[in-house]
Image (tube, rainbow, N blue to C red):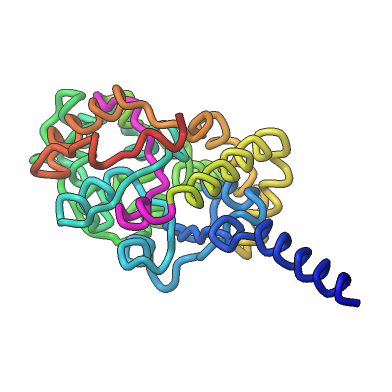
Amino acid sequence: MRRLVVLLTLLVAVAGCGSDESGSRPVTVALDFVPNPVHAPIYLAGDAVRIQTPGTGPDGLKLVTSGKVELGVLDIHDLAIAREQGSDVVAVAALVGRPLAALVAQPDVKRPRELEGRTVGVSGLPSDPAFLKAIVEHDGGNVEKIEQVTIGFNAVARLLTERVDAVPVFWHAEGVALKQRGLDANEFRVEDYGAPPYPEVVLFTSRATLERERDRIKGALDAIARGLEAVRARPDEAVDVIADAAETDDRALVQAQTDAVLPIFADGLRLDRDVLEQWADFDVAIGLVGRRPDVARAFDFTLRP
């Protein structure tokens, strides 16, 4: 009997070692927006991650900086703004590997500089006027001759009802939605107007969390990288998962947005330092930040080599 007790004790000890809490607990990932195809690799990452969707607004930055969640999804320009405002956040991987920002215009607007004397709807975010200026002026236009009106996040409706002549949007999201609704809009992607091929969407954490939970974060990124390969191998499954997560019956729209983003997911979630140095120059040049981001501090290049 004594030998049985000892054996059971040893088995419990071994089981405890094999399920080390620090390695087995899922890493929570806070999404930046309602579930959409950009998030598909996270949804297909398996049990290594737990997903937290936004509440009434995108609160991932607050959750990550407070230490309530380990990872978040963030637009790269918001990362630069957050760091300039004093948040010691660090991008650890790229999710979408190309720019998504674009001006989408009415069919009769053939090039950005033709928006002079016309109306552009902006959301109220600081990025909208910056990208409008960057695209229009790269085409030789004068942004001061464009009337900007704040429309919130009603870009699709405002363009469809012809209440504005153009809007700064993400081409893979609102741009695709407009095409689905039958508008033959012209699309001016920022990458075609002077922007480097920066990764639009990154995965980030706080420096304190990175120092404390590096191994767990690496494990989560490995799982998301496998999720990305699953999305590429089984895109129909990704469409179903995202449609369910977003609680939408418009599977055709989710399919079209998935088709749009599939080619531009970042291979292996890797960050390219040379490109990011160009991005840092670009964000200062278009006025998104007043001080050039310190790429070495803003990014960790060791977790996805």
**Residue 153 falls in which quadrant of the image?**
bottom left
Report if residue 65 lies within the magenta region. Answer: no
Asked if residue 25 lies left or right of residue 270, the reply is right
Q: Is residue 191 above or below residue 27?
A: above
Question: In the image, what residue occupies the spot 32% across and 55% down?
Answer: 206
In depth, the one of 79 and 286 nearer the eye is 79
Residue 180 x %, y %: 56, 45
Question: Where, quadrant-wise, is the C terminus in this rendering?
Answer: top left
Question: In the image, what residue occupies the spot 67% across and 48% down?
Answer: 239
Residue 149 x %, y %: 20, 56
Asked if residue 224 lies left or right of residue 279, the reply is right
Residue 117 x %, y %: 15, 40
In depth, the one of 139 and 163 nearer the eye is 139
| Residue 200 seen from this side | yes
- Residue range of the region highlighted in magenta in the rendering: 194-213
Question: In the image, what residue occupies the spot 27% across and 25% down?
Answer: 193
In depth, the one of 143 and 127 nearer the eye is 127
**Residue 290 falls in which quadrant of the image?**
top left
How many numbered markers are drawn? 0
**Residue 161 falls in which quadrant of the image?**
bottom left
| Residue 166 seen from this side | no
